[in-house]
Image (tube, rainbow, N blue to C red):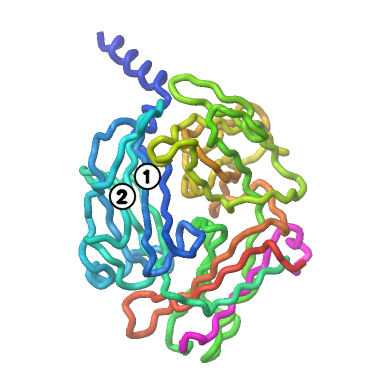
């Protein structure tokens, strides 16, 4: 009898492709009404919207919490009342059920600020979402700025012969245009973020030059990487140059054309990893359906490390959920359940220190953000005193 019950349970898990992902937040989106075209950078007066889906029927209530952090995302040693007006640990009451979709889901959303909470100071913040049993569902990191415009970012091709074919060199210069005086007794930290991906950030303590009016960080190197690939499933039953086939079994199945590891640079306009939920209906948050998207990749060599699919859609997460299965030598595949829309994605391989693109070119168009933090002797947390941004589409050779 026990064996029969076990067999039935196993059959349910295997035959239901959605069950294993039913408690995972999907289509997480953080955006604002402001001028930033970013899912991580916001001004203090922006209205920040956070939304996500939970697949299946609503089985739990969800709450959010705000945590102020230092430049490396460690919790600051200040009380919550010092950085927010009001309180958090708030239940998300704004939710709607999916309409006319084969994959049922519930869409949750909230805004900051709201009647219960307002952010008081600039800095790094972690937004944590958890269920009624205090199980963390996901977190997102955001950076809140005052209206800073004193940073200048320059991007050039690396001048060193060994890496000039694939590296980009960043210089960040901050001046005292906002009446800021750079003090020798203060602790300064620089963060440089590539393509809004905090997992590819680099941090620096020692500037090349510091005076009372200027701080310069120089010779900051990033591998150029490759342009993001994309597909558009707005018309969920349609094929295209990116989508090879669409069929239906329980939910939609979208089969992409096989991708190949690039050996030479190819210009391809992209969204630097972002995604946009889109469908031919009015209430896109609730009427856009989900599809089981099949990614496949053919590589030029046999990689020692695992290969993953990343983009904003999964917060550039390197985990088992997004690790590609090796079917045969140099050939990989992976299925991911994604909502209808336009998606940027790329393939990376895991290294001892993080991850790296399969291909790297100095010509690749990338967005770089430089944030300067300061902590004075009398301060108890790091303040943001400088910000600059530059795109490498006009990179100097």
Q: Quadrant of the C terminus?
A: bottom right
Which type of secondary structure does the marked residue at label 1 adopt?
A: strand
Residue 257 in view = yes
Rounded to the nearest angstrom, the CA distance separating label 2 from label 1 is 10 Å
Do labels 2 and 1 touch, CB within 8 Å?
Answer: yes
**At 41% from the left edge and 61% from the top edge, which residue is drawn?**
142
Question: Is residue 179 a member of the stretch shown in magenta?
Answer: yes
Please, what secondary structure does the residue beneath circle 2 have? strand
Q: Which residues are magenta?
A: 159-180
Q: Is residue 190 left or right of residue 69?
A: right
Residue 344, picture quadrant: top right
Q: Which mark is residue 129?
A: 2
Q: Position of residue 266 (x, y in %)?
A: 74, 48
On the image, the x and y values in percent for residue 394 come to: 71, 65
Mark 1 Cα shell of 10 Å, populated few (<14), some (14-19), many (≥20): many
Q: Quadrant of the N terminus?
A: top left
**Extreme-bottom residue of the structure:** 212
The residue that appears at 72% across and 38% down in the rendered structure is 300
The relative height of residue 31 versus residue 337 in the rendered view (above or below) is below
Quarter where residue 49 is shown: bottom left
Q: Which residue is mark 1?
A: 52
- The spot of residue 22 in percent (x, y) is 35, 32
**Residue sitting nearer the eye, 167 or 153:** 153
């Amino acid at each position: 009898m026990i064996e029969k019950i076990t067999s039935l349970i196993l059959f349910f898990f295997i035959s239901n492709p959605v069950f294993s992902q039913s408690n995972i937040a999907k289509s997480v989106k953080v955006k604002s009404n402001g001028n930033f075209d970013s899912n991580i950078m916001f001004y203090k007066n922006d209205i920040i919207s956070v939304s996500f889906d939970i697949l299946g029927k609503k089985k739990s209530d969800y709450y959010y919490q705000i945590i102020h952090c230092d430049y490396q995302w460690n919790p600051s040693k200040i009380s919550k009342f010092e950085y927010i007006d009001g309180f958090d640990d708030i239940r998300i009451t704004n939710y709607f059920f999916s309409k006319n979709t084969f994959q049922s889901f519930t869409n949750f959303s909230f805004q900051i600020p709201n009647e219960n909470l307002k952010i008081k100071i600039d800095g790094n913040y972690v937004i944590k979402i958890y269920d009624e049993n205090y199980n963390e569902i996901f977190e997102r990191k955001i950076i809140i700025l005052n209206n800073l415009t004193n940073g200048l970012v320059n991007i050039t091709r690396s001048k060193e012969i060994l890496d000039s074919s694939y590296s980009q060199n960043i210089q960040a210069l901050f001046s005292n245009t906002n009446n800021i005086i750079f003090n020798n007794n203060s602790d300064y930290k620089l963060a440089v973020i590539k393509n809004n991906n905090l997992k590819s950030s680099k941090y620096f303590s020692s500037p090349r030059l510091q005076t009372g009016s200027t701080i310069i960080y120089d010779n900051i190197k990033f591998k150029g990487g490759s342009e993001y690939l994309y597909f558009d499933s707005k018309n969920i039953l349609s094929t295209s140059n990116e989508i090879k086939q669409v069929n239906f079994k329980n939910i939609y199945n979208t089969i992409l054309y096989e991708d190949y590891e690039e050996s030479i640079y190819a210009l391809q306009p992209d969204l630097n990893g972002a995604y946009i939920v889109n469908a031919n209906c009015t209430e896109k948050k609730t009427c856009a359906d989900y599809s089981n998207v099949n990614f496949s990749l053919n590589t030029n060599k046999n990689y020692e490390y695992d290969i993953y699919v990343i983009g904003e859609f999964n917060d550039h997460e390197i985990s088992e959920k997004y690790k590609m299965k090796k079917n045969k030598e140099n050939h990989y595949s992976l299925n991911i359940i994604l909502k209808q829309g336009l998606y940027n994605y790329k393939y990376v391989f895991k290294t001892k220190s993080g991850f790296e693109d399969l291909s790297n070119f100095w010509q690749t168009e990338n967005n770089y953000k430089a944030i300067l933090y300061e902590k004075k002797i009398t301060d108890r947390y790091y303040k943001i005193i400088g910000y600059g941004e530059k795109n490498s589409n006009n990179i100097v050779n």
